[in-house]
């Protein structure tokens, strides 16, 4: 059993290359003036942290490393939802034009503070609840992460919908029907990520006492993450973010 966990740790550690590569891609291709740059970088680093503690946990199976693994994963998933809401509702600071009223800017600021406070509170409550229990509640932890992940995927799926059924404005300045050509990648990511998550939900006994569903999940998620970071860079550099000239 110890050899099994050690072998899994190598696969998970190699998987860390995807968020690390994504961080380098964001730093190198997204300009400092892009309002979402800091959010994407923070998420990349949170993902790297999650992969590191996953590798540590599967190498040293201890209650302390187990909690660090699960809590780091929850943080990365929660932050993904956090930045997605900021991106979709355009709550991040942005340049104003003649059409943008001060009241609208104040409303965005209030919504940003409320959303940030809610996410921080939920994270603290989640960790506190699992720490004070006499035994770790694996069912609740799985349900929490699954709910946050579904909410994130649903928002990104809405982004990928055809322009004729656009439910929101993808960028602050172009018309609501504006849909970039790469928008399909968000829907593709959702489909692939959902299929990969199914491996975690529908487990099976290890094949040859080595390869199980959890290992396959780690193996499949790396190329999906690469696709996702490519989408984030394209979205950040889209012409729709440019402020119209006066």
Image (cartoon, rainbow, N blue to C red):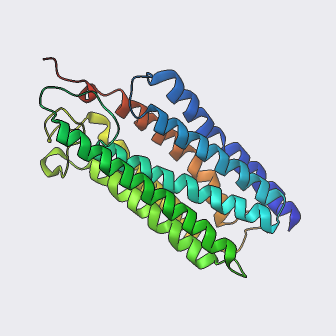
Quick check: 163 above or below 1?
A: above
Q: Quadrant of residue 202?
A: bottom right
Quarter that holds the N terminus: bottom right
Lateral position of residue 181 relative to residue 119, left or right: left
Q: Nearer the viewer, residue 153 or 117?
A: 117
- Residue 213, given in percent of the width and then of the height, sits at 64, 66
Q: Which residue corresponds to the image point at 42% horizontal and 63% vertical from the top-left?
A: 150
Q: Nearer the viewer, residue 39 or 116?
A: 116
Q: Nearer the viewer, residue 59 or 75?
A: 75
Which residue is farthest bottom? 134
Q: Which residue corresponds to the image point at 48% horizontal and 34% vertical from the top-left?
A: 38
Quick check: 214 above or below 115?
A: below
- Residue 41, given in percent of the width and then of the height, sits at 53, 35
Quick check: 151 above or below 94?
A: below
Quick check: 75 above or below 98?
A: below
Q: Which residue corresponds to the image point at 34% horizontal and 43% vertical from the top-left?
A: 87
């Amino acid at each position: 059993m110890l050899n099994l966990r050690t072998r899994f740790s190598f696969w998970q550690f190699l998987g860390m290359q995807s968020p690390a590569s994504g961080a380098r891609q964001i730093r190198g291709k997204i300009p400092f003036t892009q309002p979402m740059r800091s959010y994407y970088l923070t998420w990349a680093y949170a993902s790297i942290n999650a992969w590191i503690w996953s590798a540590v946990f599967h190498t040293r199976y201890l209650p302390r490393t187990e909690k660090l693994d699960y809590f780091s994963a929850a943080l990365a998933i929660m932050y993904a939802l956090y930045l997605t809401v900021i991106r979709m509702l355009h709550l991040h600071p942005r340049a104003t034009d003649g059409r943008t009223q001060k009241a609208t800017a104040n409303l965005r600021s209030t919504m940003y503070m409320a959303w940030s406070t809610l996410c921080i509170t939920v994270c603290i409550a989640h960790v506190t609840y699992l720490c004070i229990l006499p035994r770790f509640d694996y069912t609740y932890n799985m349900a929490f992460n699954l709910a946050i992940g579904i909410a994130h995927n649903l928002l990104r799926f809405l982004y990928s919908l055809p322009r004729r059924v656009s439910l929101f404005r993808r960028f602050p300045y172009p018309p609501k029907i504006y849909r970039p050509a790469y928008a399909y990648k968000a829907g593709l990511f959702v489909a692939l990520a959902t299929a990969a998550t199914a491996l975690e939900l529908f487990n099976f006994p290890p094949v040859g006492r080595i390869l199980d569903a959890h290992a396959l999940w780690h193996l499949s998620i790396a190329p999906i993450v690469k696709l996702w970071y490519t989408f984030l860079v394209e979205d950040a550099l889209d012409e729709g973010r440019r402020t119209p000239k006066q």
